[in-house]
Image (cartoon, rainbow, N blue to C red):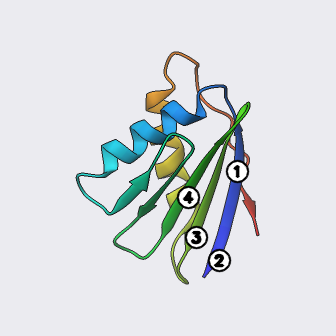
Amino acid sequence: MHAVIASVPTEHGSRYLQQLCKHWSHKMPVEFNADAGSVKFPSGAILTMTAQAGTLDVRLDLPEGEDAGQMEGVVATHLDRFAFREGPLSFHWVAI
């Protein structure tokens, strides 16, 4: 497994992580509360989000062979849909 992280500047991280988890809960296993959430993708990838003061911290744990760029795009696109009033969110993904 390998992982990528991003610290996304926003004052609405809790709202966005809850919306995304609810959105994906119809298709995938999801756990969340106001401060943190996780989504398990069929591929074995795991998305973990934590709302902090001023940021939404996002981590993607990816199985070998999983396209990090594609998964980063899926997560960013979905979160941007919920942040439409705020404008596109700023993602700077870093491999760890």
C-beta proximity under 8 Å, tags 3 and 4 = yes
Query: Callout 2: few (<14), some (14-19), or many (20+) C-alpha neighbours within 10 Å?
Result: some
Classify mark 4: helix, strand or loop: strand
Query: Callout 3: few (<14), some (14-19), or many (20+) C-alpha neighbours within 10 Å?
Result: many
C-beta proximity under 8 Å, tags 2 and 3 = yes
Camera-nearest residue between 2 and 69: 2
What kind of residue is marked 4? Answer: Thr
Q: Which residue is mark 4?
A: 48
Residue 67 lies, in percent from the top left, at: 53, 69
> How far apart are the two marked residues, 1 and 3, measured between alpha carbons?
12 Å
Residue 43 lies, in percent from the top left, at: 39, 74
What kind of residue is marked 3? Answer: Asp
> How far apart are the two marked residues, 3 and 4, measured between alpha carbons?
8 Å
Classify mark 3: helix, strand or loop: strand
| 3 vs 4, front mark | 4
> How far apart are the two marked residues, 2 and 3, measured between alpha carbons?
6 Å
